[in-house]
Amino acid sequence: MEKITLTPNSEKYLVLEAEVITPDAFAGKSLEEIRALLVWEGNTSWPLGKFFDVQGSTAANAADQAIVINGSVPRVKYVGSRMTAGAVLCKGDVDMYCGAWMKGGSIIVKGNTDAFAGIQMEGGQLIIEGNAGNYLGASYRGDWRGMKGGVITVSGNAGCDLGEYMMGGTITVKGNVDINAGIHAGRAIGAKDVGGKIVIYGDSPGRVGAQMIRGNIYMLGRIETMMPGFALKETKDVEVDGRTAAFKVYQGDRAEAGKGTLYVKA
C-alpha cells in the first residue's frame, strides 16, 4: 500500500469539515493536488495544506491507498466518510461523522470519536480504540435507515442511541453504553441481515432494544432497567465471540409487535 501522512501544523481553526480525507479522494493525485483539496471552516473553504503537512506517495486506486493522520484532530469532522476502499489510521481523537456512510476499507482510530461515527455504514471496518460518542452506527438525523453492513468495534465506552434504526452489520462495544442501544433496530425492511447484531460487554442504564422490531442484542454486562416490552422466553447457553455462557433470552419490543432478540447474561 502507498501511504500519505497528514501531520497537523500550528494553524488555528474552529472546526474543519474534511470529507476529502479519504483514500478515494487521494488516490491518483499528486501531493500538490492533495494539498489543494478543499476543507470547510463554517462557510469558508481552505486548502487542506493550510492545516496539514502532506507527505508520502499516492496509489493509482483507493484500494491501495493508506492515509495516516499523525496526531489528534478532535475538531476535524468527516474523516473517512463515504470511503469505499483503502485504509485510514488516526493516531488520536477525531470529531463527528468519522466513517459515516462508509462502504469499504478500514479505519482505525487510536483515540476517541465524537457523535455519529459510522452512521448509515454499508461495509468495511471501523475500529475505535478509545470511546465513541452518541449515535454510533445510527441513522442520519431525520432518516429511518441506520447502519446496513460492516463491522464497528469500540474498545472503550459508547454513548446513547447506539445502532439506532440499525438494518445490518455488527457493532461490538467492550465497555459500557448509554441509554437506547439498538433503538428502532430492524424497522427498515430490506436489510442485509435484518436488524444487525450488537454485542455489549459492559453495562447500560436501560432502554436497551427500545422499539426494536428485528435483530439481536447481546448484553454481557448489566441492564439497570429492563424494557417492559420484552418477554422472557428461556435461559440457555449461547456462544458470543467464541465464548459460551448462560443467557436469559427475551423477545420484543412487544409494544411494536417486535421479534427482536435480547440476550442478557444470566
Image: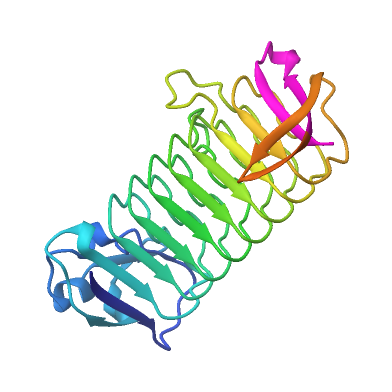
Q: Is residue 207 visible to the viewer in this orientation of the structure?
A: no
- Residue shown at the point (59%, 56%) measured from the top left: 154
In the rendered view, would you say 201 is above or below 76? above
Q: Look at 76% across and 25% down and name the residue there.
A: 249
| Residue 28 appears anywhere in the view | yes
Residue 243 position (above or below residue 97):
above
Please identify the quarter of the rendering in which residue 113 is found: bottom right
Give the vertical position of 127 relative to 36 (above or below): above
Name the side, left or right, on which 95 lies relative to 245.
Answer: left
Q: In the picture shown, does residue 206 fall above or below 155?
A: above
Outermost residue on the right side: it is 224
Where does residue 73 sit, x and y in percent of width and height?
48, 73
Give the magenta-colored segment's residue range. 247-266
Percent across and percent down for residue 253 are 72, 19
Between 23 and 53, the one nearer to me in the picture: 23
Extreme residue toward the bottom, this view = 10
Residue that extends furthest to the top in the rendered view of this protein: 257
Q: At which x and y percent is residue 241?
A: 61, 46
Which image quarter: residue 185? top right
Q: Is residue 132 magenta?
A: no
Q: What residue is at 79 percent from the left and 45 percent from the top?
A: 204
Quadrant of the frame with the C terminus: top right
Where in the figure is residue 195, as x and y percent of width and height? Answer: 55, 27
Magenta residues, dominant SS class: strand
Q: In the displayed structure, does residue 169 sit left or right of residue 66?
A: right
Is residue 261 magenta-colored?
yes
